[in-house]
Each structure stands twice: as C-alpha cells, then as structure tokens.
Amino acid sequence: MAVFSRAFGARRRESDPALPPGQYLTEDFPVLSAGPTPRIDPGEWRFAIRTESGAVTSWSWDEFMALPIEDVHTDIHCVTRWSKLGTRWRGVSLDTLYGHVDSDAAFAMAHSYGGYTTNVPLEDLLGGKAWVAFEFEGEPLDPEHGGPARLLVPHLYFWKSAKWVNGLTLMDSDEPGFWEQNGYNMHGDPWTEERYW
Ligand SMILES: Nc1nc2c(c(=O)[nH]1)N[C@H]1C(S)=C(S)[C@@H](COP(=O)(O)O)O[C@H]1N2
Ligand SMILES: [Mo]
C-alpha cells in the first residue's frame, strides 16, 4: 500500500503542470554560487539604481525596509533542472523601486556584492514580476542564498535572481552578464527552455 501510494505520487509529480519542461522537483534548496559567500552587514548595505543618463537613486537598509513590503508565493526553476514549488518570500517590488527613478531604458544589469552580474529586460522586472527579497520562509534570507537581499525574478531561470544584489544599471541595449558571457541565454524563460545560447 505504501509502495503503491509513493509510485502514484511520483507519477503525479512528473506531470505536475507547474513543472516546466526538462525540470524535476526538489524539496531541498540547493546552493549554487560562482564564488565565496560575501558577508554584508545590513548597516553597510546599499541598493542603487543608475539610469541610462547616469542619475543614481539609492537606499540604505533602513530606508529600504520603510518601503512597501510584499509577500510573494512562487515557484523557482534552476537551469541545472531543479524546480521548487510554492516558495514563500518577502521583499520590495521592482515596481516600487522603479517609481523612484526617471528612465526609458529597456534593459537592466543587476550587480551584486562579490561582482556577479546578470542582465534582465525591464519588461521582465516590472509589472509584479520581480522583487528584491530579504526573507525566505519567514526567516531572514541566509547568506548562502543571497542574504541580506537578493533579486527574485521567479518566472525566469534562477541565475537571473542575483544573490547579494546591490543595484541595477539601466541600459538602452542588452548586454550579457556573468553567466550570459559564459554561454547562458540572454533571457532565460524556463517554459521555452531558453537555457543556453
Ligand atoms: N551573486 C550571485 N548570484 C547568483 C549566483 C552567483 O553565483 N552569484 N548564482 C545564480 C545561479 S546560477 C542560481 S541557480 C541561483 C542559485 O540560488 P541559490 O543558491 O539560492 O539556490 O543564484 C543565482 N544568483
Ligand atoms: Mo543556476
């Protein structure tokens, strides 16, 4: 009986409509970092948006926490083929941050403490699609997972969700970030398997 219900569970999960093609479900939260984990004290943390004209708007941790905070319940998908369903985050919407800047740029480069970069079109950051997240499952975000704060762009492969994010540079034309220069796709939609070049 137990064996039968496990097999049934496995079949149901493989065909879960929330699972993009070529992905499998995981219950753990794997850590994937290209370098060492930077330790950033919230007292030193800043987040800055630089527009295409060079204007900079930035927030300290306390200023950031005074912005409207949203609860996000979402699935996440890594290009290495694991997906995690129904994760819970808290963060500030990119729409909120964007409301403080004056820009017509179509693309953004996200920058992180430690030097990681990743490019994302503005249309994938705005409209309730992306956040700067600082809580995961009700706890402050672990340093390994990008704490104190990371970008969260859950409808794209998870390499676009820059850990230890400290800013965005808005750009008129698209430029490749770290993994994009090393063979990953400029966009990264898991539903159409935009994995590599
Ligand atoms: N700063 C930074 N952000 C990063 C990475 C990284 O190496 N450095 N790796 C990316 C990749 S490839 C993935 S799959 C996810 C992994 O996030 P996790 O370690 O929280 O699972 O972070 C992304 N963001
Ligand atoms: Mo990844």
Image (cartoon, rainbow, N blue to C red):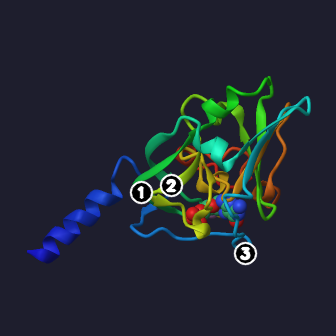
Q: Nearer the viewer, mark 1 or mark 3?
A: 1
Query: Which residue appears at 66% of the width and 51% of the height?
Result: 160
Real-space Cα distance between discs 2 and 1? 6 Å
What kind of element bears circle 1? loop
Residue 81 pos. (x, y %): 53, 63
Residue 60 pos. (x, y %): 71, 47
**Label 1 packing within 10 angstroms: few (<14), some (14-19), many (20+):** few
Compare residues 41 and 193 and report the one nearer the observer. Answer: 41
**Which quadrant of the structure image shows residue 158?**
bottom right
What kind of element bears circle 3? loop
Contact (Cβ within 8 Å) of mark 2 with mark 3: no
The residue where tag 1 is placed is 138
Residue 9 appears in the figure: yes
**Label 3 packing within 10 angstroms: few (<14), some (14-19), many (20+):** few
**Which quadrant of the structure image shows residue 48?**
top right
Residue 21 appears in the figure: no
Compare residues 182 and 101 and report the one nearer the observer. Answer: 101
The residue where tag 2 is placed is 135
Q: Quadrant of the N terminus?
A: bottom left
Using the image, tell me which numbered label, if any, was put on residue 91.
none
The residue where tag 3 is placed is 36
Residue 147 pos. (x, y %): 61, 61
Query: Which residue appears at 54% of the width and 61% of the height?
Result: 141
Amino acid on which the number 3 mark rests in the picture: Pro
Amino acid on which the number 1 mark rests in the picture: Gly
